[in-house]
Amino acid sequence: EEVEWREYHFKVKPGDLKRCPPWISPYHYRLDWLMWFLPFGDSRRNPWLYHLLGKLLVNDRAASDLIATNPFQNDRPPKYIRAELFLYRYTKPGSPEARAGEWWTRSKVRSFVAPTSLPQLKPVYQQFSWPFPKVPSDSDA
């Protein structure tokens, strides 16, 4: 079965290839900063990431406010979510990518979190005594 994956975009970390790098100094976007450090370790050693994934799987408003765009915000939440690790580089001036308005090029490094559903996250929520996210009903969407 063909699956369409939609990307969540963060406020300052690279994502959209056509988005200009933001000027954020002296401010600090903590979630984007934490996401930058994730690849240096094992995702299982960062339980907060699974907490965030669970919240995004139910379109939690507070979690969505931490990121730039939630592609499911005005729709039903996704059944699965994953995290992919990409290497971003600036485009070279005059390159075809730069002429097309792209600031970045990216290449996939590896899958960081395999496709995961909300029920699969329940043991993590229980381990840390976090309240389990409520799946919105059709009338909530």
Image: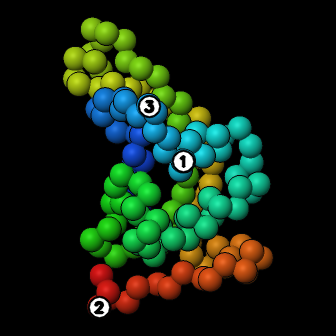
Q: Amino acid at mark 1?
A: Arg
The quarter of the picture where residue 2 lies is bottom left
**Residue at numbered disc 3:** 25
**Residue at numbered disc 2:** 139
- In the image, farthest residue toward the left: 100
**Residue at numbered disc 1:** 30
Name above or below for residue 92 compared with residue 127.
above
Could you say where residue 84 lies in the image, as x and y percent from the top left?
55, 46
Quarter of the picture holding the C terminus: bottom left
Mark sitting earlier along the chain (3/1): 3
Q: Is residue 140 left or right of residue 47?
A: left
Tell me the mark number nearer the camera, choosing from 2 and 3.
3
Q: Amino acid at mark 3?
A: Ser
Q: Residue at x 62, y 59 (%)?
A: 49
Q: Residue at x 46, y 39 (%)?
A: 27
Q: Amino acid at mark 2?
A: Ser
Name above or below for residue 91 compared with residue 49.
above
